[in-house]
Image: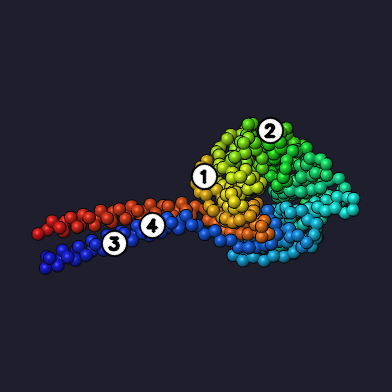
Amino acid sequence: MGRNKRIITIIIILSLLINSVGIISEFNISEKSKGERDTSASEIGSAFGTDIARNGDNLYVPQVVDEEGLLLSMSDDNGKTWNTKKLVGWDNLSSSPDIAIDDEYIHLVFSTDYEEGPKHISDLFYMRSKDEGETWSKPYKVTKNDDQFRYSGSSIVTEDNMLYVMGYRFGNSTDPWIFSIRSPDDGENWSDFSYPAKDLDIVDWPPVSFSVIDSKIFLAYYSRSMTYFKKSEDEGNTWSSKKALNSQPEYAGLSQITAEDGILFYVYAAWPRDFDSVSYKIKKSYNEGEDWEFSDTILQYEIPDTDFEGIRFYDFEIENKTLTLSYSKYLGSNRYKILCEVSYDGGETWNESIEISEGSLLLLAPSTTFSEDGKDIHVIWNDYGDKKVLYRQVTPGKQEDDNKKRAVGIVGMILLVLVSVFLFYIVSRRK
């Protein structure tokens, strides 16, 4: 009878060891799967879109389609399904509409850009919707027809029922100026233009980046390979002197600024004089831009073939101290990758790099927004080769949770093996 008990005990021990081997195999599979994260995406448009906005479970992506006009892709189920409607059927639109949402309206700005005979005509327009994008007001022309200036790269921000719009105004033979206007009555009336920055030496016109806190406007921009900061304390009527936020010998550009809990976060792209790498750097200000402290180099990588397409557009967002930097990385051989870097502690450390998509030709201009509960990130980007706007929802922190579960599992596995060995030792010593 004692011999039978020992046999049964040995069988149990062997079963425990086999289970341990199974756990090890499962972790190996999980580790392999982590390196092959799902990069599937949904096509939501066949145009060019540079902005995504959220209101509850509703998502909105404005787009410009050649020879079709201004379209709006909408989802009312947190990105699971999408539908697209045409807002303006004009074929002379600029490719950078921008959207903002407050408690009452969805606000949209866009611009025309075309030639008519000897004149170059460009205007800035505004539209709004009060029923979650189902119906829209007629386009309201904020500017007047002008044969000297064009308008591009406009961004819109709303705070306390005040609309703020900033963008570029430039002529055929002059460097662009940054303009600023505002509306106190949901786009019914607009202020005169002010110009916080003039004669910019830039090669691209990405959307102007600015933030508003308690009616104070904070502006980030670049010119002549330097990044600058300005602020207005009277809703854009007057502006402070510019303050340089990077120093030579590095070149810098493509600045973005945002704010949370009174802290200003400033991100910019920088590269050395030999143009062989790019860095994304972040600075913070706790006193409305009077002083800035360098926080971190978020990432740095070498640029194959000295190609700079990938750094022309990126997006930086913050929600409850979770920061995301979405960008396009050139891999060489005409291949690009869209990635998202995530920080959970206000930019002190960067904990996770999420691969969004990889493909050939140009994958550019990612834009992000957080879900209502702050757990997910909604990402759009543009496939220039196939002329598509693509969308994907990702969950930051999932990898961190998986690592915690993996650590707990490994500890349990070690204890299981030790118990098995101990029992085997006890049984083998019995006579």
Q: CA distance from mark 2 to mark 1?
A: 27 Å
Mark 2 and mark 4 in contact (Cβ < 8 Å)? Answer: no
Residue under the image location 75 percent in, 46 percent down: 167
Q: Nearer the viewer, mark 1 or mark 4?
A: 4
Front in this rendered view, residue 66 or 396? 66
Q: Which residue is mark 4?
A: 27
Q: Label 4, secondary structure: give it.
A: helix
Residue underneath mark 2 = 243
Q: Amino acid at mark 1?
A: Trp
Q: Does any portion of residue 171 appear in the rendered image?
A: yes
Residue that badge 3 annotates: 18
Position of residue 30 measured from the top left corner of the image (x, y, whole percent) = 42, 58
> Crowding at label 3, few (<14), some or many (≥20) Cα neighbours within 10 Å?
few
Q: Secondary structure at mark 2?
A: strand
| Sequence-wise first label, 2 or 1 | 2
Q: Name the amino acid type tagged 4.
A: Phe
User: Which residue is depicted at the point 26% across and 63% down?
Assistant: 15
Q: CA distance from mark 4 to mark 2?
A: 52 Å
Which of the two discs, 4 and 2, labels the residue nearer the N terminus? 4
Residue type at mark 2? Answer: Lys
Do the residues under discs 3 and 2 have CB atoms within 8 angstroms? Answer: no
Q: Quadrant of the C terminus?
A: bottom left
> In screen coordinates, is 246 left or right of 168?
left
Give the residue number, with chain letter if any, for mark 1.
350
Circle nearer the viewer, 3 or 1: 3
Q: CA distance from mark 4 to mark 3?
A: 14 Å
